[in-house]
Amino acid sequence: MNSILSYFKWAFIVTAAGLVSSTVYGYFSFGISGALTFLFITAVLAVLEISLSFDNAVVNANKLKTMSHVWQRRFLTWGILIAVFGMRLVFPLVIVALAAKIGPIAAVHLAFAEPRAYAEIMHDAHLPIAAFGGTFLLMVGLTYFFDHDKDVHWLPWLEEPMARSASIKGIEIGIALILVLVFSGLVAEERSGDFLYPALYGLITFLGVEILSGFLDASQAKAAAQGGLGAFIYLEVLDASFSFDGVVGAFALTKNLLVIATGLGIGAMYVRSLTILLVDRKALSQFRFLEHGAFYAILVLAVIMFVQTLFHIPEAITGLVGAGLIGLSLWSSLRWRKLERLRQAL
């Protein structure tokens, strides 16, 4: 069996390359002070991305364990390219291009020639981004708990009624729509549509991905697709939803797109490595309530993204809440294992 550190080999390599490149870039741009500043910001962004994505890794592992070995490898290769270059570099440019109604070349020029204007456009686009990502993540969390086949409960007083209520068709969709309508009424009236429509698109995207995944996984004739392509698409959309808030929040630390992409990309590598570690070591089966903590963290993150459309919540708080729930679920899992061994010994 591979050592734990071996799972993070490529993450360590990318970390070293990213920190060195940021330092060199800062030195040739602004001298020694720029080198130190870029090095510090890159490291902070990497830590921020990792702290915000613990739950992402657990949920990824939950889905990844159903995928074939080939698609697991593709998730690590194609997926990381999409995550680092697609979501951390291309996605902000697309958002700015759409929001400012300019072409992609102009968006790239704006990012490097007028970073402050670029950051302001990204900040203004935060509301629809949070609405879309928050709704998608909300559906991910609700679907996990509203499942009549779910028989392991971390908080039985809450989860057992939710599992029983899963027999009510579309209950999770109804809850999501109620929250969307509540928050669309709370945001400023002139921006209500900027929240409502992206939120509905987030819901439609989740349902579309679920339908596509089910169709591909049900196709027995296509072994390559079964447990592969559908789950891969689901994971990429999930990663995108997790990334929205981190990408926008990064502009509070720096307006430099390359530094943001480098720092968040380093963090994304650790999330991918942690995901594979959880799958290979079968950690989800060893720690009974770890999944529960991750999905509670997703629900909290979804609500936080909605609340952030009304006022700012520091990313550090979001990361601490998620890490705290994961930590509690891990502690509960270890405690359950200890009690179970005592019961078996009696």
Image: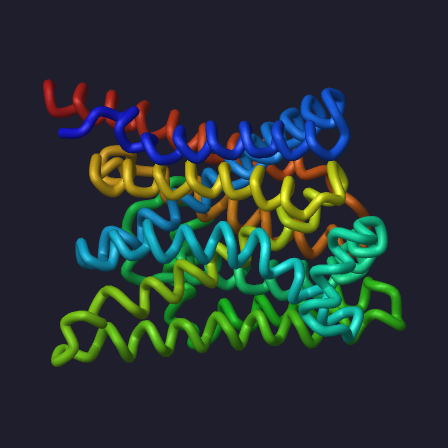
Q: Residue farthest to the front?
A: 28
Q: Residue at x 42, y 72 (%)?
A: 209
Quadrant of the rendered image containing residue 40 = top right
Toward the viewer: 204 or 112?
112
Q: Position of residue 24 (x, y in %)?
A: 61, 29
Q: Position of residue 117 (x, y in %)?
A: 85, 55
Can residue 179 be seen here? The reply is no
Quadrant of the rendered image containing residue 216 = bottom left
Toward the viewer: 23 or 192?
23
Specify the quadrant that holds the C terminus: top left
Type of colouring? rainbow
Answer left or right for 183 relative to 240.
right
Answer left or right for 213 relative to 253.
left
Q: Is residue 46 above or below residue 110?
A: above
Can residue 92 be seen here? The reply is yes
Q: Is residue 140 above or below residue 324?
A: below
Specify the quadrant that holds the N terminus: top left
Q: Residue at x 72, y 69 (%)?
A: 97
Q: Residue at x 39, y 64 (%)?
A: 234
Q: Position of residue 5 (x, y in %)?
A: 29, 24
Q: Position of residue 241 (x, y in %)?
A: 54, 57
Q: How many marks?
A: 0
Q: Is residue 224 above or below residue 337?
A: below
